[in-house]
């Protein structure tokens, strides 16, 4: 009897313990999130960057495309003329074979401004670099991409307002996008490229309001590098050199971060490439400027990679 009472008492105690544990689990609440923690970066910002780079790439190919279109038409015309002449079959066949072997020459460094730099950003595609039959096809693609940015901006703008991004920054982007639309519709080659690049200068200003894996200043460096090359291509070497000075200033905090993360070799490569680009601007040698500009961009992308790997 005593053993029976002990057994019942032990069972009741065990039940009470189990009940108290289950109640404790029920009242546990999830750890509240820090209200001051920034929201994740909206993917639409990266999408807009991709679209602007695509516009620059397509517009930058226009001088090359125009030459290829003219050369292709010339070759086709000569082929028709040969086939129409009353020459013997052997001579006609020989000339036709010569024309078939003729192809428009590859793009030269003089026919583009940003192509090599955009390649370093992985912003080019074989589809975009294939010459069209008519240059209007390229402008149609450019304007379609501009329309896509308008639609994406309609998604992004309310998010920026919600994050209290400066109205001046928001209106600045909107005004530049409207200008880009006008230049695209007017088929204005150089202003389409420069304005598309100017749009990218706003993206790091948007990014600072969100959580991002790399410093937004990296995107400022990319913009400034393109800006320097574009100014040099238009003969404005003073503005090109000012962009280099801004690159040096903007890169200081990023370089400090990389040194802390044991990536000093990347910093050294970047510093040397900036010096070389600056020297080529002083010489006003546009070929060297394009080459050294692409090396600077390659090192910026390496900086981004090093920071991302260490996260």
Image: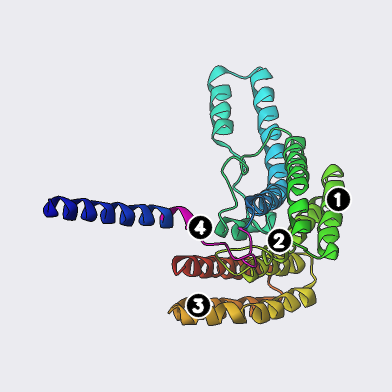
Q: Which residue is mark 1?
A: 178
Which of disc 1 and disc 4 is earlier in sequence?
A: 4
Which of disc 1 and disc 3 is earlier in sequence?
A: 1
117 horizontally vs 170: left or right: left
Instruction: Kindly state the secondary structure of the residue where label 2 is placed.
Output: helix
Q: Which residue is mark 3?
A: 258
User: Which one is in front, 257 or 4?
Assistant: 4
Q: Is residue 158 above or below residue 298?
A: above
Instruction: Kindly state the secondary structure of the residue where label 3 is placed.
Output: helix
Q: Which residue is mark 4?
A: 29
Label 3 crowd bin: few (<14), some (14–19), many (20+), radius 10 Å: some
In the rendered image, residue 173 lying in the magenta stretch gets the answer no
241 horizontally vs 33: left or right: right
Which of disc 4 and disc 2 is earlier in sequence?
A: 4
Tell me which segment is drawn in magenta.
Answer: 25-40
Q: Is residue 219 above or below residue 246?
A: above
């Amino acid at each position: 009897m005593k053993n029976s009472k002990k057994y019942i008492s032990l069972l009741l105690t065990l039940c009470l313990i189990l009940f108290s544990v289950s109640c404790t689990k029920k009242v546990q609440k999830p750890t509240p999130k820090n209200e001051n923690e920034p929201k994740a970066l909206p993917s639409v910002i990266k999408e807009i960057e991709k679209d602007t780079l695509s516009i620059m790439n397509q517009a930058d190919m226009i001088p090359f495309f125009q030459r290829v279109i003219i050369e292709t038409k010339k070759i086709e015309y000569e082929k028709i003329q040969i086939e129409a002449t009353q020459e013997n079959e052997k001579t006609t066949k020989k000339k036709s074979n010569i024309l078939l072997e003729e192809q428009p020459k590859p793009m030269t460094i003089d026919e583009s401004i940003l192509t090599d730099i955009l390649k370093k950003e992985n912003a080019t595609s074989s589809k975009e670099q294939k010459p069209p039959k008519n240059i209007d096809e390229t402008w149609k693609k450019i304007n379609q991409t501009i329309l896509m940015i308008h639609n994406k901006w309609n998604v992004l703008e309310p998010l920026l307002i919600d994050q209290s991004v400066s109205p001046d920054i928001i209106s600045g982007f909107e005004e530049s996008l409207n200008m880009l639309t006008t230049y695209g519709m007017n088929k204005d080659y150089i202003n389409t490229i420069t304005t598309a690049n100017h749009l990218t200068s706003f993206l790091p200003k948007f990014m600072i309001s969100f959580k991002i894996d790399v410093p937004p200043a990296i995107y400022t460096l990319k913009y400034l590098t393109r800006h320097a090359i574009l100014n040099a291509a238009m003969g404005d070497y003073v503005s090109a050199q000012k962009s280099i000075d801004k690159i040096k200033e903007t890169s200081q905090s990023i370089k400090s971060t990389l040194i802390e993360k044991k990536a000093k070799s990347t910093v050294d490569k970047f510093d040397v490439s900036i010096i070389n680009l600056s020297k080529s601007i002083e010489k006003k040698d546009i070929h060297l400027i394009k080459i050294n500009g692409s090396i600077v961009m390659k090192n910026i992308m390496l900086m981004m990679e090093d920071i991302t790997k260490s996260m």
